[in-house]
Image (tube, rainbow, N blue to C red):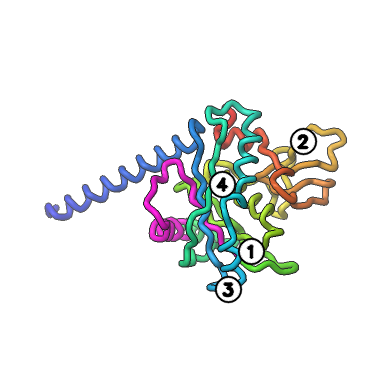
Amino acid sequence: MPVFKIIRILILLTLFLALAFYAQQQKLKSRSWAEPLQLVIYPINAEHGNPAVDDYIRELDDSVFAPIDSFFAEQSRDYDLIAQQPTVTKLGPAVSVQPPPAPLPNAGYAAIIWWGIQFRYWVYRNTPDSDSNIRRIRVFVQYHTAGKDKHLQHSLGLDKGLVALVQAFAAIEQDQQNNIVIAHEVLHTVGAGDKYAPDNSALFPIGYADPDQSPLYPQKRAEIMAGRIALSETRMRMPNSLTECMVGETTAREINWLR
């Protein structure tokens, strides 16, 4: 075998091992909860320069996302965490480059994997700083104009790389529900799984805030990874804010809040 080819293989193997080691360290440190995770929100105008969305983004500040930290702090009190404040969320600079289009919910496994590779490369190219990502979750939020009966594409949080892509409405009255989506995707990045069925109804019992409640319905809160409050066996509604959400035991175990 030519020496050049051997050297190239050794370089590639070294890079692979270094990336694997980094990913493992990122996973261990982000789920140790020894100190707060940094959540950075990078807003994106999803409508290619729509001035109304640009105006909304310019008015954003850290206070818009403060309920996320309050929610995680309040929920963590039920568990034995080292850090009293699990997260610190701040607004990062706006990003002008659009990410690769997310796969449709019914996309095949190969398409989802390919998108994940593309998205991670896009994140690498378009993160506006070079800070460490060992304990930092980068949340790219694509803002769209709000409209009656307007539906957004699925948001996605990746548990390898601590990155998320969130679809949100550029409207002050939607800020609280936007924060629910952000918190949901952040938990995906640290290992939490969805707790809802294909029809978006909350799964019983893991998707219910209080599965032991009697009578069972109506539930008063939503399990954050279900994102729905069960009013009856067939009726669900979205919570209005994170104050109507909670972290259930299954989710707590998945994110290493419960051992």
Quarter of the image where the C terminus is located = top right
Viewer-side label of 1, 4:
1
- Real-space Cα distance between discs 4 and 3? 27 Å
Nearer-N-terminus badge (1/4) = 1
**Residue range highlighted in magenta:** 114-143
Q: What's the residue at 39%, 45% (across, down)?
A: 132
- Residue 210 placed where, x, y %? 76, 35
Q: Give the answer, above or below, for where 35 lies relative to 92.
A: above
Q: What's the residue at 62%, 33% (across, down)?
A: 76
Viewer-side label of 4, 3:
3
- Real-space Cα distance between discs 3 and 1? 11 Å
Q: Which amino acid does label 2 sit on?
A: Pro
- Left or right, 168 with respect to 10, comes to right
- Left or right, 92 with respect to 16, comes to right
Q: What's the residue at 39%, 48% (across, down)?
A: 131
The magenta stretch spans residue 100? no
Q: Name the residue under label 2.
A: 211
Nearer-N-terminus badge (3/1) = 3
Q: Mark 4 points at which residue?
A: 186
Q: Which amino acid does label 1 sit on?
A: Ala
- Residue 167 placed where, x, y %? 60, 60
Residue 170: mark: 1
Specify few, some or many for label 2: CA neighbours under 10 Å numbering under 14, 14-19, or 20 or more: some
Q: Which amino acid does label 4 sit on?
A: Val
Viewer-side label of 4, 2:
4
Question: Which image quadrant is residue 165 in?
Answer: bottom right
Nearer-N-terminus badge (2/1) = 1
Q: Give the answer, above or below, for where 212 lies relative to 162.
A: above
Number of numbered labels in the structure image:
4
Q: What residue type is labelled 3?
A: Asn
Nearer-N-terminus badge (4/3) = 3
Q: Is residue 106 visible in this depiction of the protein?
A: no
